[in-house]
């Protein structure tokens, strides 16, 4: 199991997963500046993510390019799974309770949740 990522790491990781492969300079310029993050901070975060196994790097024309070895959707599923296992002790009940009280769920998100419930019910019937 990979080590968990912090909030800042997750932001950088999502950016690289969506826009990669990218160099530290590109991430610093296109993402970091808007977040108030210095190039050195971006480098530190990206290297930490590489050491944890969330990013890969290869040298292209003398410069390292970093990329996520998995698509963003798969990456986020892994992060959510880690959150559920570590923070919620594997139980989805607290997350479901949170969602039931959330006031800012859009119609599109509600439709996605309904699709998830339908898939889970269908899966249960097969078992």
Image: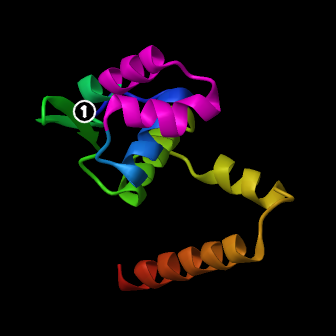
29 magenta-colored = yes
In front of the other: 74 or 67: 67
Instruction: Look at the picture and state if 55 lies above or below 52.
Output: below
In front of the other: 60 or 13: 60
Q: Overall secondary structure of the magenta stretch?
A: helix
Which image quadrant: the N terminus? top left
Q: Position of residue 111 (x, y in %)?
A: 67, 79
Left or right of 61 in this view: 86:
right
In front of the other: 43 or 26: 26
Residue at the spot 38% in from the left edge and 30% down from the top edge:
25
Residue at the spot 49% in from the left edge and 47% down from the top edge:
80
35 magenta-colored = yes
Q: Position of residue 21 (x, y in %)?
A: 28, 46
Q: How many marks?
A: 1
The quadrant in which residue 48 appears is top left
Residue at the spot 61% in from the left edge and 75% down from the top edge:
112
Q: Which residue is mark 1?
A: 53
Instruction: Look at the picture and state if 50 lies above or below 21.
Output: above
Left or right of 92 in this view: 27:
left
Q: Which residues are magenta?
A: 23-48
Left or right of 84 in this view: 107:
right
Q: Position of residue 7 (x, y in %)?
A: 56, 30
Q: Position of residue 74 (x, y in %)?
A: 36, 57
Q: Which residue is at the far front?
A: 61
Residue at the spot 40% in from the left edge and 51% down from the top edge:
19
User: Does residue 89 appear in the picture of this structure?
Assistant: no
Q: Secondary structure at mark 1?
A: loop
């Amino acid at each position: 199991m990979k080590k968990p990522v912090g909030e800042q790491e997750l932001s950088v990781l999502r950016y690289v997963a969506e826009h990669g492969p990218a160099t530290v300079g590109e991430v610093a310029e296109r993402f970091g500046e808007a977040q108030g993050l210095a190039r050195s901070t971006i480098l530190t975060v990206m290297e930490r993510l590489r050491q944890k196994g969330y990013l890969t790097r290869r040298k292209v024309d003398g410069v390292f390019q970093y990329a996520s070895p998995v698509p963003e959707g798969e990456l986020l599923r892994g992060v959510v799974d880690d959150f559920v296992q570590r923070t919620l002790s594997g139980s989805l009940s607290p997350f479901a309770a949170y969602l039931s009280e959330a006031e800012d769920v859009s119609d599109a998100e509600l439709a996605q949740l309904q699709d998830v419930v339908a898939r889970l019910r269908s899966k249960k019937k097969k078992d």
